[in-house]
Amino acid sequence: MTNKVNQSLIDTALIERVQQTFASSYGHAPTHLVQAPGRVNLIGEHTDYNDGFVLPCAINYQTIVAATARKDNLIRVIAVDYDNQIDQFDLSQEIAFQHDRMWPNYIRGVVVGLLSRGCSFAGADLVVGGNIPQGAGLSSSAALEVAVGQTFKELYHLEIDGVDIALNAQQAENDFVGCNCGIMDQMISVKGEQGSALMLDCRSLEAQSVALPRNTAVVIVNSNKQRGLVDSEYNARRFQCEQSAAFFKVPALRDVTLDMFESRSAELDPVVAKRARHVITENQRTQLAAELLGQSDLVKMGQLMAESHHSMRYDFEITVPEIDALVEIIKSAIGDRGGVRMTGGGFGGCVVSLIPADLVDALKGAVEAHYQQQTGLEASIYVCQASGGAGLIQVIPAPVSL
Ligand code: GLA
């Protein structure tokens, strides 16, 4: 089934920019317009690659693809966010990794993955563009991968479901781009639901939607702290998690209970033990958070978010001083009426806050008054709406040639 998207949540200027670039570059209107959203994770950090639980929501910032099928095997892509740079490759030849620039690899990787899954399709003319802040930990790359997968599904009526589009996108990132991420970002970009977060079991890939309480705002604040060492630190954390799962002789840390852990943690390397404790306790918090959010209990949800941040700061050690400062500033403005924590892979990026809508101004005021003064950086604030997953925005019938 095609997932039609509520267009009011998409920036119309962005849609126009992508459509106009398409028309002026290819000489006709696109037949398809597809979007895939970025995401913010409310709780459940670094649990996805441990077969655990995550609770993200898709946000109203997207990657858009305008597209038309071609009769030959050529794929042409124009990237509006990269000065209309062009990438071009042929489906009947080897599709190579590009070393001089990264953006084409997300598209190439998805196409290679679809072909390796046995999907059959010809070429396409594409224009891509988006408004998800890049490098901020809001999954702009997952959105691009999912948008491209969804586009080929729509153009060629591929028999591929949402979970496979997400898995294919993750495979593109792992095997083609070379980043060893988990499945959370791609799954939420596919499966997001308007007004809801998604409780995702990253082992079974079962997803359950959890409606956000009425009058709740999801506020993302970008620290604008340049994310450094992300890949090496991410991989180091993955390795430490695998080491501790191997110690307990289980497939993944998901299978270790807190009791099991506590009875033997002294036998582990102390750093590895801290990493494991984060994942094990974060899995518990995430399951509880889904229940509490379902009961509209923002106060207890806020406590869990605080515990999650503390665990990321001291056990998983993925926060940085600027992010910790931002969390403190926001916490002092919202008190115990909501929650705030770092979100995403870590080492910079964003914090997410879940608060009653009437606190948005207080949050903004506190960030504006204190963050720059404490850190020398200026934060960007996004008041977001939980949004639907990837889908067709609009199908424009192709002009009839006489
Ligand atoms: C990045 C990865 C995800 C996940 C988060 C941490 O966003 O892409 O798979 O591991 O970090 O929760």
Image: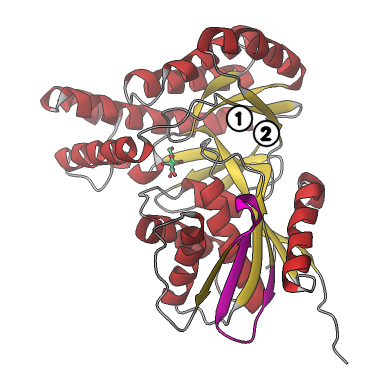
Which quarter of the rendering shows the N terminus? bottom right
Along the line of sight, which residue is nearer the eye, 389 or 225? 225
Magenta stretch holds residue 106:
no
Count residues near mark 1 (Cα–Cα under 10 Å), then give few for <14, some for 14-19, many for 20+: many
Visible in this render: residue 157? no
How many numbered discs?
2
In percent of width and height, residue 363 lies at 68, 15
Quadrant of the image occupied by residue 123: bottom right
323 vs 218: above or below: above
Say if mark 2 contacts mark 1, CB within 8 Å: yes
Residue 27: horizontal and vertical position, in percent?
A: 78, 74
Viewer-nearest residue: 298 or 275: 275
The residue type indicated by label 1 comes to: Leu
Q: Secondary structure at mark 1?
A: helix
Residue at (81, 78) in percent of width and height: 398
Image position of 145 with respect to 131: above or below: below
> Looking at the rendered structure, which numbered label has been put on residue 293?
1
Chain part drawn in magenta:
67-85
Q: Position of residue 198 (x, y in %)?
A: 58, 43
Point out which mark residue 212 bears: 2
